[in-house]
Structures are given as C-alpha cells and as structure tokens.
Amino acid sequence: AAMRHLPYFCRGEVVKGFGRGSKELGIPTANFSEQVVESFPSDISTGIYYGWACVGNGDVHKMVLSIGWNPFYKNIKKSVETHIIHTFKDDFYGEILSIVIIGYIRSEKNFSSSDALISAIQEDIEEAKRQLDLPEHLKLKEDNFFHLPEGKPVNH
Ligand code: ADP
Ligand code: MG
C-alpha cells in the first residue's frame, strides 16, 4: 500500500545531519531539511529505497535512500537521507538535491555491529544498482524533472 506513492519526485536543500558518522562508515548520506521531510506523504513507509539523484545541475546518479525516525525529534518525525552512488570531490551542503524514489528494498533494521550495518548497506547498494539498470527504471533517469530548471514531473 505504501508503494502507491512511487515514483516520488522531490527536490530540496541539503542540510547538516545528526553527525551519526555516516561518512566515517564510508556511506555519507545527504539529509533533507525538516520542511522537505514534512512534505512527504505521512504514510510513506520507513526503510530503504532506491532511485535516481542529482545535485544542482549535475549528472543523474543511482542512489539508495533511507526514510527513518529522526532522533532529534524523539523519533516522532521522519528523516530522509540519500546516499548517492558516486564519488564526489567535495561536500555539497546547501546545494539543491533532486531525487526520484522508485522502489522499496527493505524495512529499517537494527544491527549488532557497524560491520553488519555496512555489509547490509553494501547489499542495498548492489540491489539498487541491479534494479536501476532495468529499462523501466532507466527511463526515469531521463525525466524532465532532472533536466529543466523548474522541471515538474511528467505524467507516467
Ligand atoms: P551529515 O550527518 O551532516 O548528513 P554525513 O556523514 O551523512 O553527514 O555526510 C553527508 C554529506 O556528505 C552530504 O551532505 C554531502 O555534502 C556529502 N557527500 C559527499 N559524497 C556524498 C555521496 N556520495 N552521497 C551523499 N552525500 C555525500
Ligand atoms: Mg547524513
């Protein structure tokens, strides 16, 4: 039922996260502001998703995305964090991140160790790469949403 919101197009500024050390794990996640998160459908499931992402007017890359509970707000508000499957030379705080969320991978889990967490995320990344190579998903990479300055999602 939660899948009825997909594909979900979203654009917003990249803000400072909670310093959970994602970058130290080798998996930096670009966080959206609270306002952007509030604009999400309230019944969208927490968990891990895949899709496409683009920073500013840059190239469109594969991504994995986590919708989780925001520890800053005693876990009553959601957080939305995008890991772009690409190596960037510099951080891009303050830039506009455009994403389309396409599919669901799994629910949120707790891991017993950071190694277990890292290998789960590596598997999520591999699954995202495979899924996004499918013709029906590749199509969304070319969506006008990513190419026009004020691009609106077209009807699919
Ligand atoms: P924070 O807690 O501030 O979100 P992270 O450790 O999650 O810190 O790092 C996120 C930041 O790293 C992003 O806001 C972005 O500026 C930068 N970054 C660099 N490469 C990537 C990438 N491949 N995907 C996402 N963010 C990246
Ligand atoms: Mg982050």
Image (cartoon, rainbow, N blue to C red):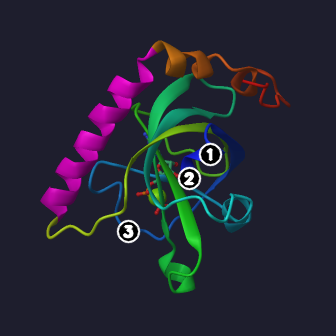
Q: Is mark 3 within 8 Å of ligand 1?
A: yes
The vertical placement of 23 against 64, above or below, is below
- Of the residues shown, which amino acid type is indicated by label 2? Ala
Left or right: 116 in relation to 143: left
- In magenta, the rendered stretch is 114-134
Which percent across, then down, holds residue 27?
33, 49
Q: Quadrant of residue 89?
A: top left
- Residue depicted at 45% across the width and 52% down the height: 29
- Residue bearing mark 2: 1
Residue found at the far top of this picture = 135
Mark 3 highlights which residue?
20
Residue reaching furthest right? 150
Looking at the rendered structure, which numbered label has been put on residue 4?
A: 1
Query: Is-magenta flag for residue 84?
Result: no
- Disc 1 element: helix
What amino acid does circle 1 point to? Arg
Q: Residue at x 26, y 55 (%)?
A: 25
Q: Badges 2 and 1: C-beta atoms under 8 Å apart?
A: yes
Please tell me whether mark 2 sits on a helix, a strand or a loop: loop
